Image: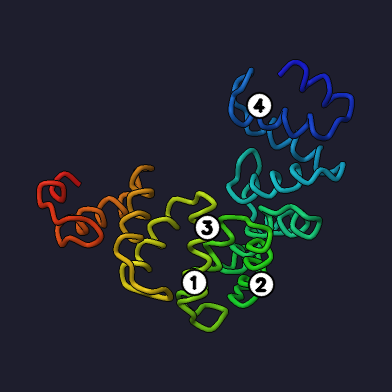
Amino acid sequence: FKYFLMAAEKMNSSAMVDLGLCYEHGRGCEKNQTEAFKWFYKAAKLGNLFGIRNVGICYQYGDGVEQSYEKAFKYFLEAANRGHVDALNDVGVFYKHGYGVKENNAVACEWFMKGALKGERHALRNLALCYRDGLGVELDYAKSFEYFLKSAEAGLVPSMNDAGVFYKFGKGVEQNFEESFKWFSKAASYGETSAIRNIALAYKYGLGVEEDLAEAFKH
């Protein structure tokens, strides 16, 4: 904290972001959201991408500053347009839900696609949901499965369960109970409750695993 502060005071924008994170999480100092926002804002003024996005997050949740979806969207959009990968998904989320901007599912999906092409796992999942539900794009289970699987492989736990569901019911992919059980197991290992229930059902009916009512009861 001491050295982040020294560097930040010498106008190092990366140190300003680090200092803001220290205040945000109470690392080496007492938690102080107002101070966190102050340093994120200073970094943003110097053009630091992480500072810009963090200012957006602060405005989104009202952390250290009065909540404003309009201002949050402004900063997310700036960060996204300047190459911050996570912000690509943020902009999509705001368009999807109409936070600080007019709701537009088609534009939301365009931003999710931009994030997905960069491998951003939340954007991959959100794009999968668009194709699954036909929001902003034509319903397409094959594409939905493709993006759920990529998101799952990138480590996003809810998508692991979704990949299992698609394998279980043969939605957008050939039905495969063994693969289904594999993805349910991965998600369950992280405590995903839907996946834990799906494992119980797999044991109960012998789907991808030998039928075992005792194991089903345990889950």
Badges 1 and 2: C-beta atoms under 8 Å apart? no
User: Which residue: 59% across, 24% down?
Assistant: 26
Vertical placement of residue 107 versus 216, above or below: below
**Residue that numbered label 4 is attached to:** 22
Report the mark closest to the observer, 4 or 2: 2
**Label at residue 151:** 3
**Label at residue 110:** 2
Disc 3 from disc 4: Cα separation = 30 Å
User: Which residue: 64% across, 38% down?
Assistant: 64
Disc 3 from disc 1: Cα separation = 11 Å
Please tell me which of labels 1 and 2 falls first in the chain: 2
Disc 2 from disc 3: Cα separation = 17 Å
Q: How many labels sit on residues? A: 4
Q: Position of residue 176 (x, y in %)?
A: 33, 67
Q: Position of residue 24 (x, y in %)?
A: 62, 31
**Residue that numbered label 1 is attached to:** 144
User: Dot 2: what SS?
Assistant: helix
| Amino acid type, label 4 | Cys
Please tell me which of labels 4 and 1 falls first in the chain: 4
> Is 67 in front, or is 179?
179
Please tell me which of labels 4 and 2 falls first in the chain: 4
User: Which residue: 66% across, 42% down?
Assistant: 65
Report the mark closest to the observer, 4 or 1: 1
Question: Which residue is situated farthest in the bottom direction here?
Answer: 138
Disc 4 from disc 2: Cα separation = 34 Å
> Is 63 in front, or is 117?
117
